[in-house]
Amino acid sequence: MSERKLYSPRVIKEIIDEYGFAFSKSLGQNFLIDKNIIDKICDGAEIKESDQIIEVGPGIGTLTQELCKRARKVVAIEIDKNLYPILNDNLSSYDNFHLVQGDVLKIDLNTLISDYFDNDGEIKVVANLPYYITTPIIMKLLEEKIRVNKIVVMVQKEVALRMRAKPGTKDYGALSIAVQYYSKPQIIVNVPKNVFMPRPNVDSAVIMLNVYEKPIVKVEDEKFLFKIIKAAFGKRRKTLVNALNSSQLGIAKEDIISILNECNIDVKARAEDLSLDEFAKITNSILSK
């Protein structure tokens, strides 16, 4: 029996009928139906035979199937119990496939890595992420400092633009800085709505995050850095002085002005004008007082 092409709309419809599956809007299920896009995701991730892959939200296994052909091991995390028999049946010919049942946001990823992967070869995250929880998943992958070299994911185009945005642009914000603190983002390909079943309401993009071994800026307290960033962008229409002064940081206005002068930052600057490096300087200056 020949292998089913899980990206084929005809095959997907067959599977839906065979297993009585229904798409879940609440889980943001949109399956890829374009082999070209699947190849671009895998090519962008530069998957080698020695690679070990974590996939989040495999769906019926459309992307998973290609990952299994290219990588040494693929561990897919899926929350929808209705998909377990579909995945196990249609990927049964791959002995390098492992299904982990559960919510990625509740799973200890460091434990998962130690349970399934060894120290040989790179570990990469490759996935078509559910859009409603894209940001929490990305931040979990980065903040938990798991042993991952590269993250290549399909996300809403708007989110991809925010992740790679530079200071002074309309897309630049707290997410931009957080992602760029841990990694170097690069959009691989823009993806139209018509390559999914069912078709989403938004355009998508595949973004690659090359994860740094260590963050590119040094701060004395990571949590405080992000507290500063959150406060600054929480009132982004205000100048940085007023945004930080009106937050819960407990820093007097004159002290903020003094710190900005010390860091050679314009006291009239707003959050979107500042680079990650400048936020790090402000953080370290406050902590040194």
Image (cartoon, rainbow, N blue to C red):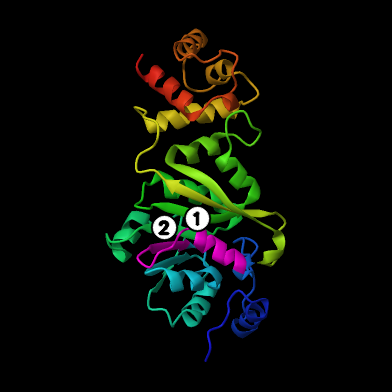
Mark 1: which amino acid? Val
The answer to whether mark 1 and mark 2 are in CB contact below 8 A is yes
Give the residues drawn in magenta, as a range: 36-55
Q: Amino acid at mark 2?
A: Lys
Mark 1 or mark 2: name the one nearer the start of the chain. 2
Q: Position of residue 274 (x, y in %)?
A: 54, 25
Q: What residue is pinned by disc 1? A: 152
- The answer to which quarter of the image holds residue 13 is bottom right
Is residue 101 at least partly visible in the picture? no
Label 1: element kind: strand
The percent position of residue 44, horizontal first and vertical second, equals 51, 57
In the image, residue 43 lies in the stretch drawn in magenta:
yes
| 93, above or below 196, in the image | below
Task: Please indicate whether residue 207 sits to the left or right of residue 104 in the image.
Answer: right
Residue placed at 42% from the left, 62% from the top?
Answer: 54
Examine the rendered structure and indicate whether residue 60 appears above or below residue 216.
below
The residue under the point 72% across, 56% down is 201
Which mark is on residue 124?
A: 2
